[in-house]
Image (cartoon, rainbow, N blue to C red):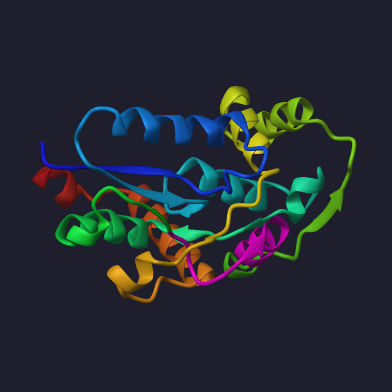
Amino acid sequence: MRRIVYLGGLGDDRDDLSDHLRSRREVETHLAEGGVPVTTIRAGIIVGHGGISWEMTRQLVSHLPAMVCPQWVYTRTQPIAIDDVVRYLTAVLDTDATTGRAFDVGGPDVLVYADMMQRAAAVMGRRRLVIVPVPLLTPSLSSRWLSLVTDVDTATGRSLIDSMSNEVVVRDDAIRRLVPFEPMPYDDAVRRALDDRAADTAPVSGDRAAAA
């Protein structure tokens, strides 16, 4: 094996990272101890059909006209389209200068989670959400509430919510010079995710079923 390419998570090591994000860093360390050069791509929210973070956003917007949320709805993040993540993951293999390095990746929009949900609602043609932040809503209560209104299980929801207290934005854009292209804006990434979901859930016609 000549190289390992690992998809980790954004987050400033100087911050008090959540257990979820800290475990991503530990994986980077353990991979590097194996003797094979590692290239790490660190991303925040990945917008794409089937991704847990995106599905949580989509389902909250789809199911609720209003929501009571903790203060993490005002934490900054830098979402990126899944197509762009895949493009980075494959392109670094052909770029020797990326060997043995870690890179931050993100889309062109830096948003707080509340803005992400509002913009997703607009793209989906839904009414503007009423979001009421409540400072005393604990991560444990939030994860239980999340499991009631989405299909994200409590344990996974707790990991996601804990991480949402950490700002996850690109600190170093060196990857943009080594793998130059323009990442997809957030609204376009949402449209792509919705289109992919519609195609995935579309009923199969008789002819297509017979061919399959």
Q: Which quadrant of the structure image shows residue 103?
A: bottom left
Along the line of sight, the residue nearer the viewer: 110 or 177: 177
Q: Is residue 102 magenta?
A: no
Along the line of sight, the residue nearer the viewer: 152 or 167: 167
**Residue 179 visible here:** no
Q: Is residue 110 above or below residue 50?
A: below
Q: Residue at x 58, y 48 (%)?
A: 12
**Residue 22 visible here:** yes
Image position, residue 119 (x, y; %)? 64, 67
Q: Which residues are magenta?
A: 105-120
Q: Quadrant of the C terminus?
A: top left
Q: Is residue 81 above or below residue 35?
A: below
Side (left or right) of 65 relative to 160: right
Q: Residue at x 67, y 47 (%)?
A: 63
Image position, residue 146 (x, y; %)? 68, 34
Q: Quadrant of the N terminus?
A: top left
Side (left or right) of 61 relative to 130: left
Side (left or right) of 211 relative to 157: left
Image position, residue 186 (x, y; %)? 52, 68
Side (left or right) of 209 relative to 185: left
Q: Is residue 1 above or below residue 11?
A: above
